[in-house]
Amino acid sequence: MTAPAATERDSTEQTTQAELEAMVRGMCAAADAGDGPAFAAYFTETARFRFGNNEPITGRAAIAASTEGTVDAIWPVRHSVDQVAQVGPQLFCRFTIRVTKPGGAEIALPCVTVIELREDGLITDYAVHMDISPALR
């Protein structure tokens, strides 16, 4: 699933809770698959992305490359969306990240993201608040 093109949504339309949750689930599916271009399609060309205490990266291409690079650095993951709340142009998303380690052991890690949306629904700023270290290879 890819993000809708900016021209597909009239900026005066109100985004429904169901649409927001579908967007977040689509982003999670892309991230779980390691599909950088599909994940990055939700972002503006100049979006800012920050994971934990890492330095922020800027731009859709950098976000796509980072997403694909993460697949090699961590054990396979699955995002479970626990909550999506909207406050103005921001989304606050709570996830459980399930990681399967060699031998089949699964761990569940809490994660929260804060997402800033532009009027057309594309992301301008994305901040992940999570300790990823238990998932690293």
Image (cartoon, helix red, strand yellow):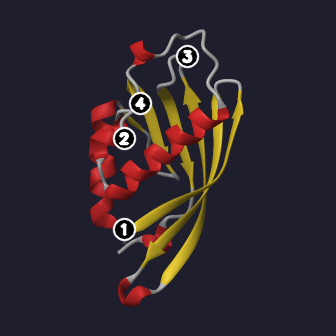
Distance between the alpha carbons at the discs numbered 4 and 1: 23 Å
Relative image position of residue 38 (x, y in whole percent): 32, 40
Q: Residue at x 33, y 49 (%)?
A: 67
Eye-nearest disc, 4 or 2:
2
Examine the rendered structure and indicate whether residue 20 appears above or below residue 53. Answer: above
Q: Nearer the viewer, residue 46 or 10?
A: 10
Q: For the residue carrying disc 4, how many other residues have a C-alpha within 10 Å: few (<14), some (14-19), or many (20+)?
A: many
* Amino acid at circle 3: Glu
Q: Residue 1 carries which label?
A: 2
Q: Nearer the viewer, residue 125 or 56?
A: 125
For disc 3, the marked residue is 119
Distance between the alpha carbons at the discs numbered 4 and 2: 14 Å
* Amino acid at circle 4: Phe
* Amino acid at circle 1: Ile
Quarter holding the C terminus is bottom left
Examine the rendered structure and indicate whether residue 76 appears above or below residue 51. Answer: below
Distance between the alpha carbons at the discs numbered 2 and 3: 20 Å
Which badge, 2 or 3, comes first in the chain's sequence?
Answer: 2
Q: Which mark is residue 74?
A: 1
For disc 4, the marked residue is 43
